[in-house]
Image: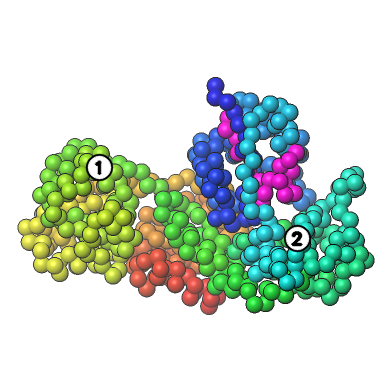
Amino acid sequence: MSEGRVFLVGAGPGDPGLLTVRGRALLESAEVVVYDRLVHLALLALCPPECERICVGKKAGGDSVDQEEIGALLVEHALAGKQVVRLKGGDPFVFGRGGEEAEVLAQAGVAFEIVPGVTSSLAAGSFAGIPLTHREIASTLVFATGHEDPAKRSASVDWRTLGALRQATLCIYMGMGRLETILVELVAGGLAPDTPAACVQWASLGTQRTVTATVGTLVEETRRAGLAAPSIVLVGEVIRKRESIAWFEQRPLLGRRIVVTRNREKAGELSGRLERLGATVLELPLVSIRPKVDREVCGEVFTEIGTYDWLVFSSANGVRCFFDLFFAAFKDVRALGVMRIAAVGEATARAIRDLHLEVEIVPERAVAEDLASALVETGSLDSAKVLVVTGNLGRDVLVRKLEEARAIVDRFPVYENLPTDLSDDAVARDFREHGADAVLFTSSSAAKSFADQQASLELTAGAVRPLVGSIGPITSATLRELEFGVDFEAEKSTLDSLVAAVVERLQRS
């Protein structure tokens, strides 16, 4: 049995992109993940499918696992020889009880490692446009917790002493429940009531909201805005800088929830673009991609590989799967011969260019009809041998139009699209409970899978019913056949155009 080990990993403040490289690597190889309630669901998707996921987070007024049980759980799985990731919001050693858990592991003789994370106050300052230190007005930085245990008065915060500090920035964690008392004590210690103060809720996420006020008015302003936990309270002169350098909350999709239905291999690019515009993205991979090829057909294709005039790719997935097979059979890319290469769209072309191969044809619209037309316009298809690389659901229209132009076409499927099971998916559960502002479809197969899984995606009462967005006419036609309707469609069948359509449509609603 292998030696078990526990990794106390800081998950960061919320945005999954703020996880450290080391933290990501550990999640990708974890056998057990024990995580807090506020950990972003996208981080759990990094774990292997067979990884056991255990939620131990607390929710106000709800059930939770107490600290002693968490320690015992970590020890139990580690002694069973498992690689355990304890995923903690923020940083394990900043109000995260990571020190207590490390002590339990040390006492039990369990090997462990500490992986730091971005703590919430750093994110609150950065994403709200508030520099926590400034050489002219803030040379002291204080982290304090407002969540005091009355039984441990020796460890409680002396707010009056902190109120006497000058040229300081005070970062208050878990203070919303006692905010009025804390501010009164700060003033009693000498802090001026007109000192700038701010409250940042859900820092770094698309749901982030910031209220700025003064120490004397912050309670009233946060109540008026409806801010609650999880929030970081910041106090100090540095808050005045927000007026000139606030950036995050100016983004056009801030506060919008958008569902991306691409397969896991391709979702990241679209999700990243939307998140950079402020959106909260829910990834629902309705289709998964698996390499699959008929070995006999593969052998025939590669035997004749140097005789083709055109090599045509209908997707980036096809590029990846084809060249995995190609380089398993040939050591030199020159085995392709002098064939010309065409791609259905820019994303597919980019995957080909990454292999240092030239792409001669990329139609303006990423649809099979336009690719076929572009090839026909070259005047090179009469009696030409063409290899079309596709998946199991590739449309026949491309092959048919090429054959109509008197080309000799071989169709080579190298992967299959498989529907995913969302019945027990955490993101699907979130979508059912809360809904979204928009759901985006980038393929007909995703639309069909969405229809097939309606039982797992049915919205509950009160959930926001999303607008339906499509990447292009083919996908739109499928959506209408399935009676979903289409609220907006990309002008061109590209991710850039789809994102532009989302921004334009949601800004009008």
Residue at image mark 1:
327
Q: In the figure, is residue 193 to the left or right of 355? A: right
CA separation in Å, label 2 and label 1:
56 Å
Q: Residue furthest front?
A: 135
Which range of residues does the magenta coloring cover? 82-100
Q: Nearer the viewer, residue 153 or 238?
A: 238
Q: Is residue 261 magenta?
A: no
* Location of residue 258 in the rendering, given as x and y in whole percent from the top left corner: 52, 63
Q: Nearer the viewer, residue 438 or 165?
A: 165
Q: Secondary structure at mark 2?
A: strand
As drawn, 400 above or below 214: above
Give the residue at x 20% y 58%: 341
* Location of residue 177 in the rendering, given as x and y in whole percent from the top left corner: 82, 58
Give the residue at x 70% y 68%: 134
As drawn, 202 above or below 213: above
Residue at image mark 2:
141
